[in-house]
Amino acid sequence: MATLGDLERSVMTLLWDGGESLSANEVRDRLDEDLAVTTVLTVLSRLEKKSMVARERSTRPHRYSATASREEHTVEMLNEVLGTASDREAVLARFIGGISDAEAAALRRMLDSE
Amino acid sequence: MATLGDLERSVMTLLWDGGESLSANEVRDRLDEDLAVTTVLTVLSRLEKKSMVARERSTRPHRYSATASREEHTVEMLNEVLGTASDREAVLARFIGGISDAEAAALRRMLDSE
DNA sequence: CATTCCTACTACTCCATGTAGAAAAGCCGC
DNA sequence: GCGGCTTTTCTACATGGAGTAGTAGGAATG
């Protein structure tokens, strides 16, 4: 559902890492590629339609911010990939079989500290 | 990388659930939609290019099978979503915070039985 | 009010995917 | 070996998402 293109992802990265809201011009200035502001605005509008960014329309350069943190978004993706099906556990089992010992230990800690 | 369209996914589901290899005609017959065999063949070729299916070329209807089980594929997706970045653990923590008690228990069991 | 800034609308390209016909290639019974 | 059926390949077109940006229209400010 929330599949991102390269440019969209770059923009989201800025919003995620920057923490606060940015105007279209600020976004453009922080991007590596040298793009027209209209391009950035188009991308921001598309991200808004995807509910990935919120737009503050009351200020005059509109300001854009991520609606969810990168981690929240990744968890959403994770659950999307995992689905609600019964094979969730089978997949998780297989996943756990492939992680490092350190990560397994970290997971145990997380589970225990609930 | 291995992003699937609707039809591609339907075909993979058949190959995953069926267990064994199928010919293009068999795939077509088992699909809900009534499609031309050529359509199915195109899709199978594309899936082959994506390394999602293997094709047995020595038999005369070629036979197609999934190169990885559904679980294996899902785990791949999972790792793709998770990435190799440092925030893997942060994401996992958040993920674990959102799962059911039953699933948490299952996870603990899986981790311990390693 | 004129200038400058910002946004909305429109448009074009490229690529993935769904869809299938036409043609080529392989096989089977005669 | 040949005609005809089956299967595969090649080519093609439509649709939709994403990258990219121009142009026009609306807002702010001196």
Image (cartoon, coloured by chain):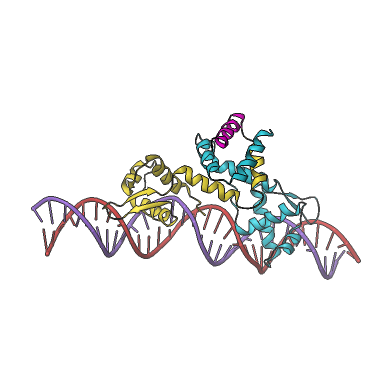
Chain colours: A cyan, B yellow, C purple, D red
Report the side of C27 relative to B51 (left or right).
left
Look at the picture and state if C16 lies above or below B74.
below
**Picture quadrant of residue A92:** top right
Q: In which quarter of the image is the C terminus of chain A?
A: top right
Locate residue A49, reporting x and y percent.
Answer: 65, 49
Q: Which residue is drawn at 58% across and 41% down?
A: A79
Of helix, strand and loop, which mostly describes the magenta segment?
helix
Q: Residue at x 42, y 53 (%)?
A: B47
- Total marks shown come to 0
Q: Which residue lies furthest to the top in this view?
A: B102
Report the side of C1 relative to A10 (left or right).
right
Locate residue B66, reporting x and y percent.
Answer: 40, 48
**Picture quadrant of residue B102:** top right
Report the side of B46 relative to A47 (left or right).
left
Please name whichever residue, B65 or C6, is drawn nearer the observer in this view of the structure: B65
Q: Which residue is drawn at 53% across and 42% down?
A: A97
Please name whichever residue, B15 or A98, is drawn nearer the observer in this view of the structure: A98
Report if residue B108 lies within the magenta region: yes
**Picture quadrant of residue A60:** bottom right
Please name whichever residue, A97 or B76, is drawn nearer the observer in this view of the structure: A97
Q: Residue at x 32, y 48 (%)?
A: B23
Which stretch appears magenta? B100-114
Locate residue A44, reporting x and y percent.
Answer: 68, 55
Report if residue B93 lies within the magenta region: no
Locate residue D27, reporting x and y percent.
Answer: 81, 56
